[in-house]
Amino acid sequence: MQCPNCHKNASRVIDSRPTDEGRIIRRRRECENCGFRFTTFERVEQTPLLVIKNDGTREPFDREKILRGVAAAAQKRPVTSDQLDKITDNVENKVRKQGVSEISSKEIGEYVMNELVNVDDVAYIRFASIYRQFQDISGFMKTMKDIMDKHEQTK
């Protein structure tokens, strides 16, 4: 494994432990050249999955893109990076469990919103406002009302 500090290919594993319910192995490594310590993650390579965008184009599924979108929606909110990773993992697992080779970006967006609504209402509204591309205040207000109704039901 190449050291991110000195770029030599000599590192040793200091610690390994499973994460994400055993689907990922987290490894702490130390460069034998410069002593820099860093973390790597090992996961099973998944079959290729294409995302069908709104304009009909296709692009490879990218879990980091989901993570960036969720992180942007949760910016300056009390949402931890572990929660963001968990949301991303849950969405990816739902997508992969379908066993399809192509999925629409709309479906992925719905999965993200279903996860976000249980974590932080403001992050959910932020994500929804971009994902649903509200054209007027009525769409926004309907989403707000849905959130408020959900809170009333849980009381």
Image: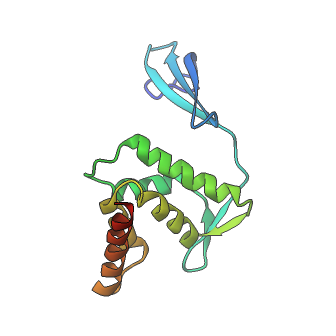
In the displayed structure image, the side of residue 79 where residue 43 appears, left or right: right
In the displayed structure image, the side of residue 81 where residue 58 appears, left or right: right
Q: Residue furthest front?
A: 155
Figure quadrant of residue 42: top right
Camera-side residue of 34 and 56: 56
How is the rendered protein coloured? rainbow
Please report the residue visible at 48 percent of the width from the left and 63 percent of the height from the top: 114
Please report the residue visible at 73 percent of the width from the left and 63 percent of the height from the top: 101
Residue 16 drawn at (x, y percent): 58, 21
Figure quadrant of residue 57: bottom right
- The quarter of the rendered structure image containing the N terminus is top right
Residue 99 drawn at (x, y percent): 74, 59
Residue 44 position (above or below residue 84): above
Residue 139 visible from this viewpoint: yes
Please report the residue visible at 49 percent of the width from the left and 13 percent of the height from the top: 33
- The quarter of the rendered structure image containing the C terminus is bottom left
Please report the residue visible at 29 percent of the width from the left and 53 percent of the height from the top: 75
Residue 136 visible from this viewpoint: no
**Number of numbered discs visible in the structure rendering:** 0
Residue 20 drawn at (x, y percent): 57, 37
Figure quadrant of residue 34: top left
Residue 87 drawn at (x, y percent): 48, 51
Camera-side residue of 89 and 58: 89
Residue 146 position (above or below residue 29): below
Q: Residue furthest left?
A: 76
In the displayed structure image, the side of residue 99 where residue 83 appears, left or right: left
Residue 145 position (above or below residue 61): below
